[in-house]
Amino acid sequence: MQLTIHNSLSRRKEPFEPLDSSLVRMYVCGPTVYDYAHIGNARPIIVFDVLFRLLRHLYGEQHVKYVRNITDVDDKINARAAAQGVPIDEITARTIAQFHEDIVALNVLPPSVEPRATQHIAEMQQLIEKLIEHGCAYVAEGHVLFDVSADADYGILSKRSLEEMIAGARVEVAPYKKNPADFVLWKPSKDGEPAWDSPWGPGRPGWHIECSAMSFRHLGETFDIHGGGIDLQFPHHENEIAQSTCALNTPFMAKYWMHNGFLQVEGEKMSKSLGNFITIHELLEEWPGEVLRLNMLRTHYRAPLDWTRKGLEESRKVLDKLYRAAGEAEAADQPNEAVLAALCDDLNTPKAIAELHRLAREGKAAELKASANLMGLLPVTAEEWFASTAPEVEVDEAEIERLIAARAEARKNKDFAEADRIRDELAARGIILKDSPQGTTWEIKR
Ligand code: AMP
Ligand code: ZN
């Protein structure tokens, strides 16, 4: 089946034609590791995991290479280490372990390679040397800067003119820059900051060169797909393209650029100051990872996503329903065609989920399971799902039946206050009563 994806370079959906179908290559910008990952960070992780699974399905597991890096050298990491008075390595090791724990709970596959920036300093320096050699970078006051005026294609991704970029204020003005839009490839380190020897003095890399070096090292000069959140389009991805194409003399870096939309929480931008900043870790204390995963995929990846408690509750109900339909069935050999077609249409996960509902309605358990698995959903059996998600309620059935009978008696005597009291008492213990003409039944609140 033909995969089409929305390419941020052309701003259009395009048929996906890999450079080499014997090895489809994808790079996604990973986390900067100084603190727990928040639920916004989980969006690219989950979205590109679905794409990774789909590519593996279409081209074969051995024919897809997915690289997702870890940025473990960054000013935010240095600041955090200084504030806590602990070594930088301790902050990064702890954060990486936590990140892995979180995303395993989201049923995210490990990428083929997970390179760390600090292990690729030599490759970064080689690229920087090439950039200087090619007249695209210059040395000033211990810094090496990319010279945007040397790159006629600068702005190709974000479609901004140089004036707009400078006015966009996300560029740092500094006296040693020839042009305010020039960006740092290498910078000197102060005492106590991590530093590596280099031809330009001891220092550390800028953020953008890290991804150019790691993608080059693991995927080659050009590759198929580069992904990340929409906030990275400018300047990060624009700068990655400039660095890679100018250093390697290539016409492009990645053929397709994909960007996920932003996630907000209960209608507001997530921020520490608003107090609505939620980590994956916190959410996992309350919700099964699969609920978070499904909740993420119910919105198309390019659309803005409003993360709400109501949405999570609905997602849990959807999973209950799908698991009930899937039961203990073994997955069919192939996913359903309509689910596959939806995913091949620029990862239309909301449509794919609607098709899962249809399969559930039609009682096609094996196909439902195979199709959900393709999206990383329904990885366990219904029995395991309900056992793991059932709340820990002590149920004494005889006691509940006795209280239901007492409530019926109270209602018969028109003692509605007592009847309500009994209902509330049970509710407080997590037991919900359902009245119908056939009598009263109960269930455990979820
Ligand atoms: P960072 O650690 O901030 O560099 O972000 C890691 C990844 O998470 C990047 O691909 C970002 O674009 C993405 N990201 C960060 N915040 C959000 C958000 N609120 N919604 C969606 N993606 C986000
Ligand atoms: Zn990157």
Image (spheres, rainbow, N blue to C red):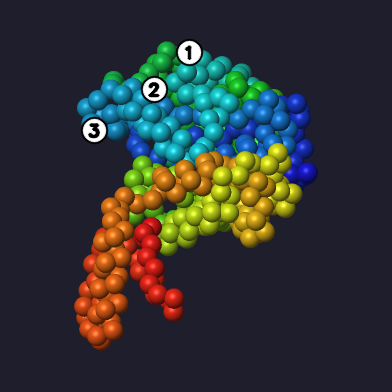
- The quadrant of the rendering that contains the N terminus is top right
Q: Identify which amino acid the numbered label 2 is placed on.
A: Pro
Residue 248: quadrant of the picture: top right
Whether residue 195 appears in this view of the structure is yes
Q: Is tag 1's residue or tag 3's residue first in the polypeptide sequence?
A: 3
What residue sits 56% from the left and 35% below the top?
A: 28
The residue type indicated by label 3 comes to: Ala
Q: Residue beneath label 3, please?
A: 83
Tag 2's secondary structure?
strand
Circle 1 crowding by C-alpha within 10 Å: few under 14, some 14–19, many from 20: few
Q: Is residue 26 left or right of residue 18?
A: left
Mark earlier in primary sequence (2, 3): 3
- Report the disc number at residue 199: 1
Rendered location of residue 433, percent (x, y): 35, 69
Percent from the top left, x then y, of residue 311?
46, 60
Q: Quadrant of residue 129?
A: top right
Q: Earlier in the sequence, mark 2 or mark 1?
A: 2
- Label number found at residue 188: 2
